[in-house]
Image (cartoon, rainbow, N blue to C red):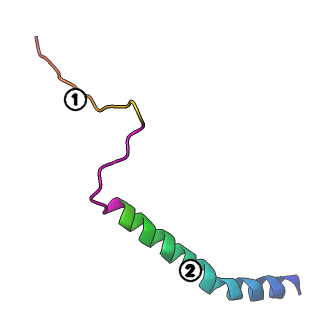
Amino acid sequence: MATDAAIFVSKRLQRAVFALLCLFAAHLVLAVASCEPEQVAMGAARIPLEFSQR
């Protein structure tokens, strides 16, 4: 009886969970494909490393 109720609830939630996963995936794709530069914390700077061979 409890398993039937759990399966019924999970079947009802499948579409909602799938929709949320699709939204999350779309957000992830848009964030990765964004052309905007990365946000850097204040005071932080990128310093190129120079390797000298002696």
Q: Which mark is residue 12?
A: none
Q: In the picture provided, is 17 more to the left or to the right than 48?
A: right
Q: In percent of the image, x 32 and y 31: which residue is there?
A: 45
- How many other residues sit within 10 Å of disc 1, few (<14), some (14-19) or many (≥20)? few
In the depicted structure, whether residue 41 falls above or below residue 38: above
The stretch of residues the image draws in magenta is 32-41
Residue found farthest to the right:
1
- 25 vs 10, left or right, is left
Viewer-proximal residue, 27 or 1? 27
In this orientation, which residue lies closer to the viewer: 41 or 22? 41
Residue at left offset 49%, top offset 76%? 22
Q: Position of residue 52 (x, y in %)?
A: 13, 17
Q: Is residue 19 magenta?
A: no
Q: Quadrant of residue 16?
A: bottom right
Q: Between residues 40 and 22, which one lies in front from this camera angle?
A: 40
Residue at (70, 88) in percent of width and height = 12
Quadrant of the frame with the C terminus: top left
Which residue does the numbered mark 2 point to in the structure image? 18
- In which quadrant of the rendered view does residue 47 lie? top left
- Between disc 1 and disc 2, the foreground one is 1
Q: Is residue 4 left or right of residue 50?
A: right
